[in-house]
Image: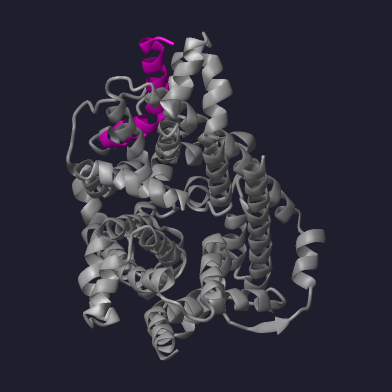
Amino acid sequence: MGARVIYLLLVVLVAPLVFPFLWMVSSAFKQPSEIFAFPPSLLPESPTWNNIVEVFTFQPFARQIYNSLYIALVVALATCALSLLSGYAFARLRFPGKNLIFLVLLSALMLPTEVTLIPNFLMIRDMGLADTHVPLLAIPTFGAIGVTGIFLMRQFLQGIPRELEEAAMIDGIGRLGILWHIVLPLTRPILSTIGIVSFLASWNSFLEPLVFLNRNELFTVPLALSTYTDTSGNPIWNLQLAATAVSTVPILIAYLLARRHITDSLAHAGLK
Amino acid sequence: MKRGRREALTAYLFLTPQAIGFVLFVLIPLISVVIMSFTDTDLLTNESKPVGWDNYVEIFTGDPAFWQSLAVTGIFALGLVVINVGLSLALALALNRRPRGAGFFLTLAFLAVVTSQAAWAIVWRFLLQGEGGAVNGLLDLIGLAGPNWLHEAQPSLAAVTVVAALKTVGLKAVIFLAALRNIPPGVIEAARLDGASEGRITRHIVLPMISPTTLVVIVITLIGSFQVFDYVQLMTHGGPSHATSVLAFYIYEQGFELFRSGYASALAIVLFGLTLVLVAIQWWARKKWVHE
């Protein structure tokens, strides 16, 4: 097969993955009347910033971006901390019930969120925590995302020698000291994988915010995107597309800055 | 002995924070959903009365929408796996020839992976409009009249399936690419010296050698497809007339839009059961694969 065939194949395969971004960005700068012009045009005729501005006045979109950011950050940090503790216990310590506990935890990976969502909703409402960010922080951290973290951490620790830790133990350093001074620096690569994966999972989550949140100012980005609608619930396209374009900017910048790292992390966790 | 006990105590201490949260947000809800599936519970009033097996009887004998959901889920899952795995394998094979700019193409393919499902769904919903949608605009250029994609039964299911399948092509391609690069180069060199064509080498050497990876990718894609909700909610809301109502969406609709918590719980148990069957098949298949 010649190089030309390869490039043709690549273009055909990648075009439907790139085309939506081009269209989204160009529509974000189009006049509302031009969005549905037929035949559709790829470049805006008279580009405008109005859509982007109105995205932030239509609803508290800046606040909603902040909500998504801090929730994803807390989920990522909490997942890292908990997976370090639990992963270390599973990889390095002997205790009765180890395999059984690990198996029970792993079952969360096969459990679709939808299955436990109704009891979770009822319980969280009874606790008076519906329409707060608590469920968006707790459910992923303790559910599938958290368990994925433990699994990755345990696997990583099993693959590195324990001499350093044993030497420290002989020196009389306690388990927590070992965890902090020796294990934490060693596990930095896998911690960054766990952090990236859990951050993205939280940032992208849609079902939990949809179910738990009512107040507009508490919305996260994916939910907020779907609320640029008129009174009969139809999308106001110029705003919805402009907001969607704005929402992808932070993630795309982060991706382009740490491309290799993010790619490897997602592929590694995707295989788990 | 004493050291062993201390070690166990430390382990339990380290596990406690995760364990408390896990029991609270996973284990108890899992037990409750089983119990609730035998009740008639109203989500709003929280009124609940036991009804025995009634919900399950209704699901399997009195609810055509469930059977439709099951069929839709099956078609969606199958289509998703075929399109997603097929395209990502093709992309990986092309990139594995190491053409110049391979990294650039991979980066482009990965943009969709890091974007949220909500953003992906919203943009595609816009592109797939019947009139004035860019997809139909492109079809028009080559003289084809596209359907009103998201408002007609079969086109809508096809559209949602393809949109969901495209999103993770970049990710799966990276996974395949890693497997391809693990093939010892000597094997392929030898075949080439024997005069085998590139096509034959791919079919008879490369694809069999990465088949364990292919199996894993198929399984994670299949299990993931059972949980797909965002695309359906945002692109079609399960419509038109339940044509895209996958089981995960149907559970949401029954539970959170019609407030039938008990019935939705029974549906959730069915979904969990299906997932477990898939996992069991996967274990069996992996075992078989290794022995052969």
- Mostly what secondary structure, the magenta segment? helix
In this figure, what is the number of numbered marks? 0
| Residue B273 visible | yes
Determine whether A233 is above or below B147 in the image: below
In this rendering, position of residue B161 left or right of residue B263: left
Q: Is residue A217 visible?
A: no
Query: Front-most of A172 and B262?
Result: A172
Q: Position of residue B115 (x, y in %)?
A: 34, 45
Quadrant location of the N terminus of chain A in the rendered image: top left
The image's colouring method is one colour
The segment highlighted magenta reads A1-25
Residue A109 colored in magenta in the image:
no
Q: Position of residue B224 (x, y in %)?
A: 53, 51
Q: Residue at x 53, y 11 (%)?
A: B196
Which one is in front, B105 or A98?
A98
Q: Position of residue B50 (x, y in %)?
A: 73, 82
Q: On the rendered structure, is B1 left or right of A71?
A: right
The quarter holding residue B150 reads: top right
Q: Is residue B164 left or right of residue B47?
A: left
Q: Identify the residue at image location x=69%, y=77%.
A: B40
In the rendered view, would you say B227 is above or below A172?
A: above
Verify whether residue A19 appears in magenta: yes
The percent position of residue A34, horizontal first and vertical second, equals 30, 30
Q: Residue at x 46, y 68 (%)?
A: A143
